Image (cartoon, helix red, strand yellow):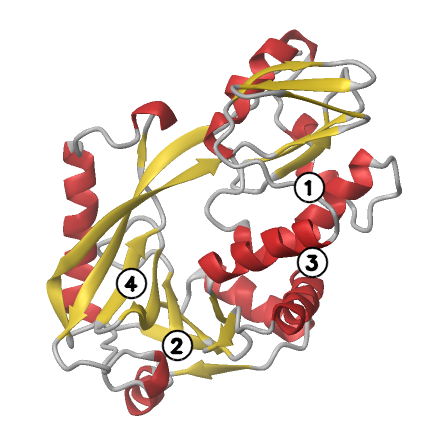
Amino acid sequence: MMEECYQIWAQLEHEAGTQLHRQTGLLLLGMKENPELKTIQATLSRQAVEHQCLSAEELKQRFPNVRLARGEVGLLDESGGVLYADKALRALQDAIRHLGGLVCDGEKVMEIKPGLPVMVKTTSRSHQAKSLIITAGPWTNQLLRPLGIELPLQTLRINVCYWREKVPGSYSVSQAFPCFLGLDLSPAPHHIYGLPSGEYPGLMKVCYHHGNNVDPEERDCPEAFSDIQDVQILGRFVRDHLPDLEPKPAVLEHCLYTNTPDEHFILDRHPKYDNIVIGAGFSGHGFKLSPVVGKILYELSMKLKPSYDLTPFRMSRFSGLGKAHL
C-alpha cells in the first residue's frame, strides 16, 4: 500500500504546487537480535527498498550526535521521510472543493439514520446520500453504538514533546538528520520516534508511541501521573541517545491515538447496513496511508472490488465481535 501512497502523495504535491513530503531517511535503532528489526530488514529486502545496516561504529561516523548502548545497531531505510500534515490536509481539502465536493467544518454529527438514502443530522443541517463513510477517529463508537455495533477501540492521549538543540541545527533536516524509530530500547517498553528539527526551529520532536486512556470529550483534562512517567522515560532516552538535546522538553503538546488490539486499522462495511462503510483504529500510523485508505473506502462505498486484500482489516478478525456485539 505504501508504494502506491508515495505515487499519490507525489501527484497531489504536483497538483498543489507546494512541498508536502520530504525524504529524510528513517533510522531504526534496536538491539542486534531484536526480532522486529530483523522482520523490517527482511521486508525492506523483499520490497527492494534501499537500506543500510549500520554497526555502532558506522553509525557514530554517519550520525555522530546519536549515541548507542552496547549491543544496539542501526538500520537506515533510505525511503523514509516526513509528511507536512497541515499542508497535506489543506491540499486535500482544496482538491475536494475543486472537484465539486463540500467541506462542512465545525458541524457535530448528532444522529445517523440508516436506510436508502442514509441521513446524517448535524448541529446545523441534515445531509442525505446513497452511502456514508464514517471516519470519526476517537468518536467512532459514539456514532456506531446507535447503529448496533461497538468496535474494540482504545483512545490514548499521547504526549507530543519537542526538545531544544544545544547547538541550533544539529538535528535539523538541513543537516540531513533522518527521522528515527527506537524499537523497545531501554528504558522504554514501547517504541520511541523522532523527527528532525524543522517544524519548530531549533526543536526536535521526540515522542513515545504510547499513551494513557482518555475520554475524547475530556482530552484536555489535567495530566495524569502516568503522563509524567512517559515524559520521564523520554527524558532518559534523550539523555542517553541524543546527547546534543536538552534532556527536558521545551514544548509539550497532546494528540489522540485510536488503537485497535492489533494496531492495524479497520476498513469494512457495517455488518447490517452495507451502504455504511467504516474506517477506524488507525493507531497512530494511518495518515501516511490515507491516499490508499481513501481509495479503498471509496471502493467499498461504491460496491467495487477493492484494490487490496482487506482480510487483515476486517472487523470480524476480533474474536469478541460475534453476533452478540451487532
Q: Is residue 286 left or right of residue 298?
A: left
Q: Tell me, yes or no, if residue 35 can be seen here.
A: no
Q: Is residue 237 left or right of residue 209?
A: left
Locate residue 290, reporting x and y percent.
61, 52
The residues bearing labels 3 and 2 have C-alpha atoms spaced at a distance of 22 Å
Q: Are marks 1 and 4 in contact (CB under 8 Å)?
A: no
Disc 2 on helix, strand or loop?
loop
> Which residue type carries mark 2?
Pro
Is the residue 192 above or below the residue 132 in the image? below
Q: Tell me, yes or no, if residue 190 can be seen here.
A: yes
The label on residue 178 is 2
* Residue 58 or residue 226, whichever sits in front: 226
Q: Which residue is mark 4?
A: 205
> Which residue type carries mark 4?
Lys
Q: Which residue is mark 3?
A: 1
Q: Quadrant of the N terminus?
A: bottom right
Which numbered disc, 1 or 3, marks the residue that appears first in the sequence?
Answer: 3
* Disc 1 versus disc 4: nearer the observer: 4
Locate residue 4, reporting x and y percent.
71, 64
Residue 254: which quarter of the image?
top left
Q: Are marks 1 and 3 in contact (CB under 8 Å)?
A: no
The label on residue 280 is none
Q: Residue furthest bottom?
A: 61
> Which residue type carries mark 3?
Met
The residues bearing labels 4 and 2 have C-alpha atoms spaced at a distance of 12 Å
Is the residue 72 above or below the residue 321 in the image? below
Q: Which residue is mark 1?
A: 312
Q: Quadrant of the C terminus?
A: top right
Which numbered disc, 4 or 3, marks the residue that appears first in the sequence?
Answer: 3
